[in-house]
Image (spheres, rainbow, N blue to C red):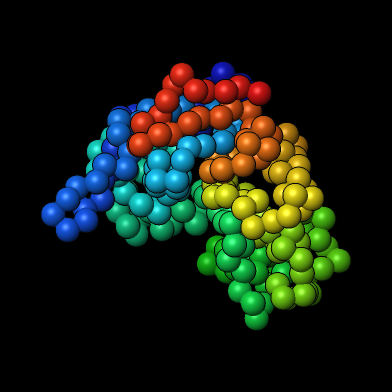
Amino acid sequence: MDNASPIVEIRNLSKSYRRGSQTLPVLIDISLDIDKGEFLALMGPSGSGKTTLLNLIAGIDKADSGSIKVSGTEITSLSETELAFWRASNVGFIFQFYNLIPVLTAYENIELPLLLSGLTKKERRSHVETALSVVNLTDRMDHRPGQLSGGQQQRVAIARAVVTDPTILVADEPTGDLDRKSAEEILDLMERLVHEMEKTIIMVTHDPRAAKKAHKVKHLDKGILNAHLQTDF
């Protein structure tokens, strides 16, 4: 890792939700730096704010106060339209349940984020084939999700996440729906993305085995980032 500015800079971030007349604080005054090429795990009990923090970093949700800079862009001040454009080129998403479209082949699912990119069909094919090769699924490109195992579906989802060469990858419980062997393979693949492609990954997980693959683990509890529970591996 170099000594340049962090790729993600979070300062004094707070977020609440309204439930009837109540205001429920979800994140309280969070400050956090994430370096380029870092693999960060966010842990904590259910309801601690992990997924909310991930969604704020990814530009899916908006904070009440505070600042998030990703690669120098202050995303908290972008409009909804600007955020949508920013997300499309800067964020790769990896979900627990893959979110693949059942009627499309692996190839077509991976190609989806490129359809609005202005690339030619030939350029899109080159990107998709590279992504398939990274996740070792070139021989399954014409299979639909229903013809693939859970681990293979998650690899397709990871290929879709990296096909646009995003600035950051956000992963929400990426091994939560997988058996132990498939989970290990997915975590090994995520490690490779960090080490070989210098990807920056922010992962929410309940699984200590998954967290052990990360460079750094941060713990959230009741919306507070507990600095005393940081773990470096």
| Residue plotted at (43% across, 34% down) | 220
- Residue 126 in view, yes or no: no
Left or right, 228 with reference to 149: left
Q: Which residue ends up furthest to the front in the rendered image? A: 45
| Residue plotted at (75% across, 49% down) | 180
Left or right, 25 with reference to 88: left
The vertical placement of 182 against 9, above or below, is: below
Q: Position of residue 95 (x, y in %)?
A: 57, 56
Q: Which residue ends up furthest to the left in the rendered image? A: 21
**Quadrant where the image shows the N terminus:** top right
Q: Position of residue 91 (x, y in %)?
A: 52, 50
Q: Nearer the viewer, residue 79 or 212?
A: 212
> Residue 27 sits in which quadrant?
top left
Q: Nearer the viewer, residue 216 or 93?
A: 216
The vertical placement of 138 against 5, above or below, is: below
> Residue 106 sits in which quadrant?
bottom right
Q: Position of residue 108 (x, y in %)?
A: 68, 72
| Residue plotted at (62% across, 53% down) | 176
**Quadrant where the image shows the C terminus:** top right
The vertical placement of 116 against 176, above or below, is: below
Q: Nearer the viewer, residue 56 or 119?
A: 56
| Residue plotted at (32% across, 57% down) | 80
The vertical placement of 133 against 9, above or below, is: below
- Residue 211 in view, yes or no: yes
Q: Position of residue 193 (x, y in %)?
A: 70, 42
Q: Which residue ends up furthest to the bottom in the rendered image? A: 103
Left or right, 28 with reference to 94: left
